[in-house]
Image (spheres, rainbow, N blue to C red):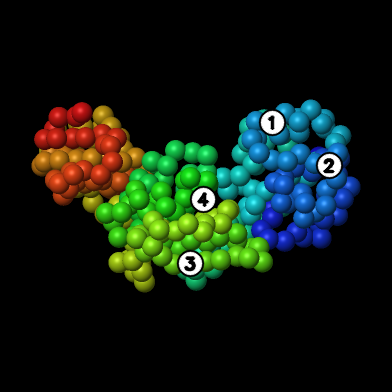
Amino acid sequence: MIRVHGYLGQSSQALRDEAATANLVVGGRRHLDALEVPEERRIVLGALSTAVPKIVEAGDDARIVVIASGDPGLFGIVRRLRAAGLDLEVVPEPSSVAAAFAAAGLPWDDAEVVSVHGRDLAPGLAVCRAWGKVAVMTGPDQGIRELAAGLADLGRTYWLCERLGETDQRVRRLTGAEALELDDIAQPNVVLVLDPALIGSVGWRLGAPRPEAPLPQVDDEAARIFCRLLPRLGDTLWVRGGTGRQVGELARHNGAAVVDLDEFSTPPGTPTWAIDEGVLS
């Protein structure tokens, strides 16, 4: 039996009882230390590629407890264990995303959630460009400073939510310039990236597909290029000129981030795609 428990700052009595009698307890070192799991019964989570085979090798009769932060089904270990063909029971705690928005005093039913922990930063930046309310689950060297640098031209507001649920939890609201200067960032943390112009409005999502919003009127060449690319949420499209802007309007409708190169004397970053008067490069 494998039971996956969420953990956000403190352990439940059920988790403590199960960890005390399980054959194996899998989790981060801080989780295992807090539960006083002896060395012979613990698997410290680092790379999942080493932990999953040990869980599989334990056999069907073993009682295994897996501990993950917050909701293990949200960018968590549940996906990897299910991909390995394992049957699970999941006991979630509030996700770190829910805790972050609660700490900031903001609703989040209209937010996008992305993870850049151990992943490429570029799609996360694209989502933050396309949407006005995004929670980013970060990782070392993929955190608030990198987000602020990649979004410096947008004037976003940042909430840095550190060590959520722990006794030393800290939540800070920052400008982009302040975020770039930070040198005391605690792990783990979640970053909320917000468009301040949309605070208090209905519908934070920039460029979100809306059933009531009509498709932009474009010429055949723009439609052809859009169908070739099919940009969507997580993609970045760089455009220039009349045809490029038409493609950009379709891309925004589809949830992609769009950067108009004509607005920059020195274009930021490196284009994913560039459309210059209908020529794709």
**x 58%, y 53%: residue:** 188
Position of residue 125 measured from the top left corner of the image (x, y, whole percent): 37, 47
Kindly identify which residue carries mark 1.
50
Position of residue 171 measured from the top left corner of the image (x, y, whole percent): 52, 66
Position of residue 187 measured from the top left corner of the image (x, y, whole percent): 58, 53
Kindly identify which residue carries mark 4.
137
Cα gap from disc 1 to disc 3, whole angstroms: 35 Å
Name the image quarter holding the N terminus.
top right
Kindly identify which residue carries mark 2.
39
Kindly identify which residue carries mark 3.
172
Cα gap from disc 1 to disc 2, whole angstroms: 16 Å
What's the mark number on residue 266?
Answer: none
Which of 4/104 is in front? Answer: 104
> Mark 4 is on which residue type?
Met
Per the image, label 3 sits on a secondary structure element best described as: strand
**x 35%, y 45%: residue:** 126
Quick check: can you spot residue 90?
no
> Mark 2 is on which residue type?
Glu
Per the image, label 2 sits on a secondary structure element best described as: helix
| Callouts 3 and 4 close, C-beta under 8 Å | no
